[in-house]
Amino acid sequence: MRKVWQLTLLGILLCTLVMLPLTGSCQLEETLPLPVFSPQEQGVLNLWDTGPITLDPAISSEMTSHTYVMQIFSGLVHLDSESRPAPDIAESWQRSNDGKTYTFYLRKGVKFHNGREVTAQDFKYSWERACSPETGSQTAATYLGDIAGVNDMLEGKATEINGVEVIDDYTLRVTINAPKAYFLAKLTYPTAFVIDKANAESGKEWWHKPNGTGPFKLKQWKPGEVLILEANELYYRHPVSIKQAVFHLLAGMPMAMYEMDKIDVAPVWQYHIDRVTDENGPFYKELAIFPELSLFYMGFNTQKPPFDDTNIRQAFCHAINKERIIKLTQKGMVTKADGILPPNMPGYNQSLQGLDYNVAKAKSLIASSKYGSVANLPPITITDSGWGGNIPEYLGAIIQDWQQNLGVEVTVRQLEPEIFPYYLKEEVNEIFVSGWIADYPDPQDFLDILFHTGSEYNYGNYSNPDVDALLDQAAVEPDDAVRFTIYQQAEQKIIDEAACLPLWFGTSYILVKPYVKNYKLDAQGIPTLSEVYIEK
């Protein structure tokens, strides 16, 4: 989900435990003491997490916040179990013959948490607020930018989106600038969710007490300690089985908490993978594995020396032994990536030619570059997420390969994880560490968003007119088979030019107590808590 993830949960935990608590408080019902729950209290699901950075759907752009935003808010459409757009607050819609106009018909009786009914005007307000320059959304251009008039609002040239028309309380007409096969899928992203105007205009930190429409309401939040979601009794789609989801924020190591029955679900990291995959061990039957449509990669700042030279970018890609690094540092929990699109993604190209490990070729490319020798390269710094100089093992191995194979010295500069996804564009050095999880299962969500010239998330400033032309052609191609072939051509060009260094595709490993039923992670790694029930 358009979302960027930079640091494993383990890294966040280890870093955060040595930091002072965040300043300020987002606690609701502050007169209440922190709750103490029995791990098997009726209807209560106990979870571990780091906590959100924001609960504003127009601002949220990373997984940690999305996990909560997706429970508290909702939109016109959502992704079903097959990751296809399906009705949500809009019970149906019609598409014009030219593919440029969508008419959405809202369910009647959908209410915000405070009981006020949702209307089409609420969506128009929500989208225009997201596109207002004052909001400062980094996601509005990407996920709402196909709508006619959005760019004018983003640039401050208009005060409303002329492509969004309220027909009546339950009918919304949306006009886009060209027929796009993936437009509906974009509306499943939080930027397109509906918010309550009175709530949003109640103060700068209104989202500390959000009035959403999702299956859960925010009951209590004390950063670094606890966040409690309680079932929304007004939820319009189906009754929610669990009464409360209690997130114990940075409360300790999740594996230990799981063993002591303090939490019902725990993420599994490399340090414990051998224990939980032992078929004769106590955890094997409680292990759940969910594929992710995700890519972890290192990006090159293509407009800044030395990575303004394609030969240098290619050399750095050829100079690391990905298979060895993955085997030593990831313990088989990920899959080596040669390209951008993960397996199971429509348009995945099994025949894609990656830049393999070849030290001799890497040295030859440097000699052929405009720099001629590593001695002429300027200083190179990697922008990463973290605190206190604690460099992840995989990153240390990559840096060591570059040093041993090329004779290049590389330094690391860390940004605090809570600001990394929101300030990377302004702070990026010569190389940056990043990741991407699909917002929706379409090649456009990776290739266009990450590598099209001028894209908000094109942090490496990669620009190739030929690639742009292919991406623009694919965007309006109605035949999926043809469209995917065009995307594959664009992907191969992006890899050939070493716009980035793909590292691996991810998989989620979690432990789930036997009495917790239907706990699943979607392709983004986010649980659908409204489907969970606890069996006693």
Image (spheres, rainbow, N blue to C red):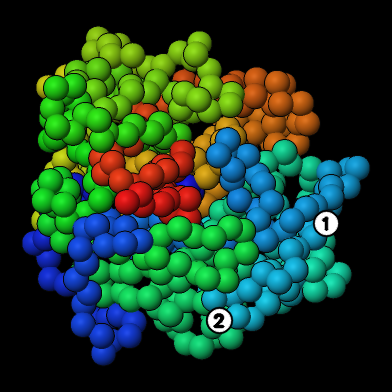
User: Which of label 1 and label 2 is nearer to you?
Assistant: 2
Residue 321 relative to residue 152: left or right: left
Amino acid bearing label 1: Thr
Q: Residues within 10 Å of mark 2 (few under 14, many from 20)?
A: some
Q: Quadrant of residue 289?
A: top left
**Residue at horizontal 34 percent and vertical 28 percent from the top:** 504
Which residue is found at the position 58% from the left and 86% from the top? 198
Q: What kind of residue is marked 2?
A: Asn
Residue 435 in picture, x, y percent from top left: 37, 41
- Look at mark 1 in the image and give the residue it sits on: 103
Q: Is residue 52 above or below residue 179?
A: below
- Pick the front one: 101 or 502: 101
Q: Which residue is mark 2?
A: 114
Q: As displayed, is residue 141 above or below residue 382?
A: below
Q: Which residue is drawn at the image coordinates 61% and 68% (left, top)? A: 194
Left or right position of 40 against 198: left
Secondary structure of residue under mark 2: loop
Viewer-proximal residue among 260 and 357: 260
Rounded to the nearest angstrom, the CA distance separating label 1 from label 2 is 27 Å
Residue 490 seen in this snapshot: no
Callout 1: SS:
strand
* Horizontal side of residue 341 vs 94, given as left or right: left
Q: Position of residue 137 (x, y in %)?
A: 52, 65
Task: Where is residue 43? Give x, y as percent.
Answer: 35, 61
